Amino acid sequence: MSELLIYYNGEFVTKENATVSIYDHGFLYGDGVFEGIRAYNGRVFKLQEHVDRLYDSAKAIALEVPISKEEMSEAILETLRKNDLRDAYIRPIVSRGVGDLGLDPRKCPKPSIYIVSQEWAAMYGDLYEVGLKAITVGIRRNAPDALSPNIKSLNYLNNILAKIEANEKGGDEAIFLDQNGFVSEGSGDNIFVIKNGKIYTPPTINNLKGITRATAIELLEERGYEVIVGNLGLFDMYTADEIFVTGTAAEAAPITKLDGRPIGDGSVGPITKAAVAAFEEVTGSTGTPIYE
Ligand code: PMP
């Protein structure tokens, strides 16, 4: 395959030339926003929703994206075309841009836009069959009134600390609680809990408004399941019949062990299997065509 090309401020550059200035506030301070998007079989899944969330994240940090949403969507599609990709992970990034060493964003006259893409295989490999081991981490999710988890900002340190803790304790994924002890989300995914045939998921105050989460709710309701949005505690997780997480990278992935306790009987349950199958069906058959 020819060399990977990266969109950088309206141009396509090679990996070697896609360098970021040391003075870019995205690098210095995590001052910027991003998205993670997937393409399946030549179609970009939920492109509009991801672009909308990117611009909402930018708005929340008072960052004006210098191109329109239509231009952004087209740049994403063009990046895939340039790299001849059909099944891919796509990472648009908008940083505050180059400034000085101070914090003040007024010193950054021009935001930088990068779009990186790569071929993609299932994130958790064989674990979709047996389920993930999850660990409730001691570090709490960023408080919504400090740095809202609704903002998909370049500052993922909270998530990275959670991942470090989960790795240390032998977990495949970390589960965050919020400042009040309510279940928040995974380090990179939203959470669904199943008990007595009903499906529960936390509201999106203390976590990211997941696009896969919204899709899963829609698909499960269409199939006749009741989905209840409400606060959950650790007890609800430990005593669940099934747990699964959702995310663009993770897709729908079962959790079969949490903090050493088997979830349900410790195997992947029927509603999780239904969610995984429904998600596969929709990703395989919908989305914005890359090549028309
Ligand atoms: N929470 C966090 C912290 C994430 O990084 C992600 C991945 N974007 C999600 C949830 C899931 O969101 P989505 O389904 O939109 O990918």
Image (cartoon, rainbow, N blue to C red):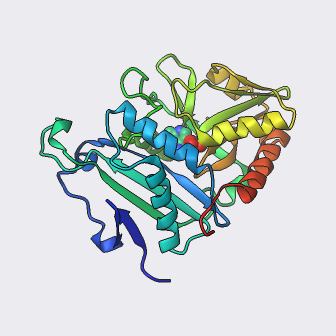
Image location (x, y in percent) of residue 247: 60, 45
* Residue that appears at 73% across and 59% down: 284
The quadrant the C terminus occupies is bottom right
20 over 103 or under it: above or below = below
Q: Nearer the viewer, residue 212 or 136?
A: 212
Q: Residue furthest bottom?
A: 1
Relative to 198, 65 lies left or right:
left
Name which quarter of the figure residue 116 lies in.
Answer: bottom left
Image location (x, y in percent) of residue 157: 37, 40
Image location (x, y in percent) of residue 175: 56, 35
Q: How many numbered discs sit on the rendered protein?
A: 0
277 over 264 or under it: above or below = below
Q: Is residue 255 visible?
A: yes
Relative to 162, 66 lies left or right:
left
Relative to 247, 51 lies left or right:
left
Q: Residue furthest top?
A: 180
Name which quarter of the figure residue 287 lies in.
Answer: bottom right
Image location (x, y in percent) of residue 11: 34, 67
Name which quarter of the figure residue 25 lies in.
Answer: top left
User: Which quarter of the rendered image does ligand 1 occupy?
Assistant: top right
Q: Is residue 158 visible?
A: no
175 over 48 or under it: above or below = above
* Residue that appears at 45% across and 35% down: 56
* Residue that appears at 61% across and 24% down: 203
201 over 160 or under it: above or below = above
